[in-house]
Image: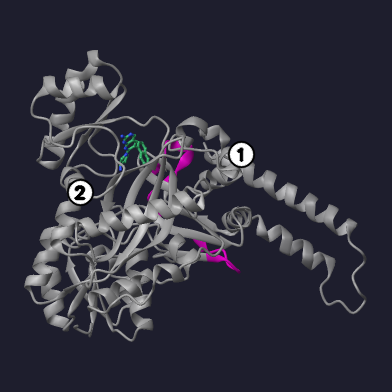
Amino acid sequence: MTKIQKLLVANRGEIALRIMRSAREMGIPTVAIYSEADRQSPHVRYADEAVCVGPAPSSESYLRIDAILEACQKTGANAIHPGYGFLSENAGFARAVRNAGLIFVGPSPESIEIMGSKLAAKAAVAAYNIPMVPGTPDAITDREAAKQTAARIGYPILIKASAGGGGKGMRIVEREADFDEGMERAVSEATSAFGDGSVFIEKYVTSPRHVEIQVLGDQHGHIIHLFERECSIQRRHQKVVEEAPSSVLTPEIRAEMGRCAVEVARACGYYGAGTVEFIVDDQLNFYFLEMNTRLQVEHPVTEQITGIDLVKQMIYIAEGKPLVIRQEDLKIHGHAIEIRVYAEDPANNFLPDVGTLETYVRPQGNGIRVDDGFEQGMAIPIYYDPMIAKLVTTGATRAEAIEKMIRAIDEYQITGVQTTLPFCRFVMKHEAFRSGQFDTHFVNHYFTPDKLIPPTDSEEGRQEARLEARLAAVLAAWLFQNSQPKPESNSTVTQAQRSKWREKRFR
Ligand code: MV4
C-alpha cells in the first residue's frame, strides 16, 4: 500500500476540477498541468500547484508523456490521474507512469491493452458466460469463409475494426452483394485510422439501446458494479443525454447485466473504475460490446443515484486499499439525468461555435449539479473538445428529474456562443424520451432544426424570438398579477418590482 502524497491531474477543464475537488476533500494536494491556451483556466487556479507542459495543441501539451512525468518530478507528485480522453486509455502511458515509480490512478497497462482491442476483449471473456452478438471471434483473413459466416448469421451484418471504438471503423452491410465492397472499405479505413486493419463481423442489431454498467475493482480481486447508465440518446456516437437507472431494465435483467459486467472485469484482472458497454435489443436481450478502461464523462449520474464518489474510490484503489463497499450495500436512490452542454449550434448541423461566454450563469437549487470548467468572460479554446458543461439533475423519480432538467435548462444563461441547450430541451419535452420508448436512432428519427424553440437560424430570428419571449413574459406577469390576491399592506415588494423581476428572467 502506497499513500498518494500529491496528485497530478493530467487533464483540463471540468474533469480536472472534478478530480481535484475529491483529492482536496481527502487531504491530498494537487498539481495541474496546462497548455499555453489554458494559463487562466479554472483548473489551473484551483490546483495547489500548476506546471505548463507546452503549447496549445494537445499533441504538444496534454499528450506529452515526457513533459507530464517531468512535472511530477518537479513537484514531487507521486501519482497521476488521467481523467478521460487524452492519455487515459493509453497503455504506454500507464506503463511509463509505473516505470517511473509513480502511481497510475487507473487500471493496469495490461487491462488497458486487452480492452483496447475488441478481439482481445472477446477472447478474454470467451471462457466466461457472457452473451455476445453472433459473429466471428477472430480477425477476418479468409473473405469467402467470412461471407459464409455472414450468410449463416443473416444480414444485415456489421463490420467492425478491432482497434476501433466509439463507433469509429464500423460499416453496415445490408446484403451479400455488398459484402466485398464493405469489407474492402472497412479494412482500408481501419488501416489508415488505427494502423491496424483487423476487422470482424457481427450480426447488426437494428434498434439497440446503449446500456453500460459501472464497475469498481480493487487490487485484491474484489469487483462490484454500480448499476447501469442508459446512453442511447446520442448523435454520431457523441452521447448527448445519459441517465441512471435505465427505464427499460427489470431488477432481474439489471442484476444479470451487473453480474456479467463484473465477470468481464474479472476476465482481464481489472482494477480501478471501468465501464462495461452492452447493447440491448427490443426483446431486452443484452450483448457485451466493449469495456472502457477509464472514468467516463457521464460518471456523475452513477454518483448521484448511488451516493458514491467514484474518484475517491479510484484513489483508494490506486493506493492499494481494499474496497469497503459490498455489492449488497448498494441501492439505487432516485433518478439522475445528465445533459452535455456543447458550444455547438443545433440549428446549424451542430457546428462547433467558438467564441466568448459573454453571459454565463449556472442554474441552481436542490437536485442540480453543474460540472464545468468555464467562467463568464472566458473564451472557448478551439484546440479542445467544445463541451462547456455537464448539467445533472437528480429527482426522486424520472419524471421529477426531467422537470428539474427543463427548469435548469431554462434558467441556464449562456450568451456569446450557441449551445446544445435548446436541443436538450427538445429531448426532455419529446414524448418518446418521456415515455422511455427510444433507441440509439432517437436523434435521427425525431430531430430536425425546426423543432428548436426559439428559432435560431438567423440573428434576426433570434432577436424576434427574444422580443416575442419578452412580450409573452410581460403579458404573463400582468395576467399573473391580476389573478393574485392584493399584496399585504405591510409587503415591501411592489407590483412594479415584481414585474421587473419577472421581465428580467427572460432577457
Ligand atoms: C453495434 C450496433 C448494432 N449491432 N453492434 C456503436 C459504438 C460502438 N461501441 C458499438 N456500436 C454499435 N455496435 C451490433 N452488432 C450498433 C452500434 C451503434 C450504437 C451503439 C451504442 C450507442 C449508439 C450507437 C449508434 C449507432 C450504432
399 left or right of 50?
Answer: right
Q: Separation of disc 2 and disc 1 at Cα?
A: 42 Å
Q: Which residue is mark 1?
A: 431
- CA neighbours of label 1 inside 10 A, class few (<14), some (14 to 19), many (20+): few
On the picture, is 475 further left or further right than 350? right
Q: Is residue 119 visible?
A: yes
* 361 drawn magenta: yes
Q: Which residues are magenta?
A: 344-368
Of the 4 image quadrants, the one containing the N terminus is bottom left
In-front residue for pair 313/338: 313
| Sooner in the amino-acid sequence: mark 2 or mark 1 | 2
Residue 341, label in figure: none
Residue plotted at (22% across, 85% down): 5
Measuring 16% from the left and 32% from the top, which residue is drawn there?
189
Q: Position of residue 7 (x, y in %)?
A: 24, 78
Q: Quadrant of residue 131?
A: top left
Q: Is residue 443 above or below residue 262?
A: above
* Image: 279 above or below 488: above
Tell me the crowding category of disc 2: few under 14, some 14 to 19, or many 20 or more residues within 10 angstroms, Cα based.
few
The quadrant of the rendering that contains the C terminus is bottom right
The residue tagged 2 is: 127
Residue type beneath disc 1? Glu
Give the image location of residue 410, x and y in percent: 60, 54
Q: Give residue 416's position: percent from left, percent from top.
A: 47, 53
